[in-house]
Image: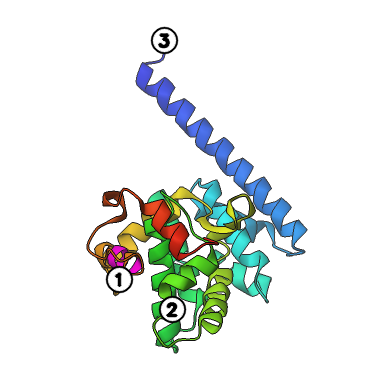
Amino acid sequence: LSSPTSDTFSVDINAEAQTDMDIHRFIEAKSSDLSLKLSQGEVGQLTQQASGLFIWCTTVFRYVESSKNPYADIMKFITGTPPLGPAQQIHSLYDKIIQSAVSPVHPEDVSLMQMILGVVFVTTRLRPLSAKAISTFLTKEGENHEEKGNWVQNIIRSLRSVLYEDPTMSNAVRTCHPSFLDFLEGKIKADFSLSITQLHQLMFRKLNDPYHLNKDIPDLYQRISRSIPEA
């Protein structure tokens, strides 16, 4: 009789192999849809980079679908670093996506993107906001609201492989997968210029209560509706 340990190990190996086969087929199908003529070796490298994560594959192809040069962009993921563990691999992908969303030579774009992602992070679990509502929070006194709104909308569109506008919630900006929120939490703490607490205070300055987190404001939704009727 086989020991329980060897049986479990065999099942795990088989399950992992089946997942890799499914990912391989998925990559072949998506590549065909986008007319990407990938060799079997390149499909195999992408499968390896996925580290068994379908969300890695779907995010890569959402990113490539909106690219001006899909083949060149997908090759970035084929020729990238060796696969890490699953969590590190998906976070590495998210890092590449936000770094490519705006030009590093325009610090104001980078700063605004960080603010947008910060607002998405602090609102998404309670009441996700539309791009228009987000721009209202981020428009400073003296700035043209329409111009700022267009700027915010363009950055959100450049992040459409990780964010989407939900038509069932008045086009609220939401994350494509919960793992992006986990990534953002660590990213805000490590790399963004504002802390999570500062982001709360920034948002609710417009609600005339800048010193409380949203969980501590009992009439939060009413205040948002009064400040931003179309949120």
73, above or below 41, in the image: below
User: Which one is earlier in the sequence, the residue at label 3 or at label 2?
Assistant: 3
Give residue 57's quadrant in the image.
bottom right
At 55% from the left and 84% from the top, the residue drawn is: 147
Query: Circle 1 sits in a helix, a strand or a loop, which is it?
Result: loop
Front of the two marks 1 and 3: 1
Q: Is residue 131 left or right of residue 178?
A: right
Front of the two marks 3 and 2: 2
- Please tell me the numbered disc located at residue 191: 1
42, above or below 5, in the image: below
Asked whether 16 falls inside the magenta stretch, the response is: no
Callout 3 environment at 10 Å: few (<14), some (14 to 19), or many (20+)? Answer: few
**Residues under labels 1 and 3: Cα distance?**
54 Å
Disc 2 designates what residue?
A: 139
Q: Is residue 53 left or right of residue 44?
A: left
Front of the two marks 1 and 2: 2
Residue 119 pos. (x, y %): 40, 64
Tag 2: residue type? Thr
Residue 83 makes an appearance in the image = no
Query: Circle 3 sits in a helix, a strand or a loop, which is it?
Result: loop
Circles 1 and 3 in contact, beta carbons < 8 Å: no
Q: Is residue 29 left or right of residue 187?
A: right
Which of 210/77 is in front?
210
Give residue 137's quadrant in the image.
bottom left
At 51% from the left and 56% from the top, the residue drawn is: 174
**Residues under labels 1 and 2: Cα distance?**
22 Å
Quadrant, the N terminus: top left
Residue 132 pos. (x, y %): 54, 69
Disc 3 designates what residue?
A: 1
Residues shaded magenta: 199-203
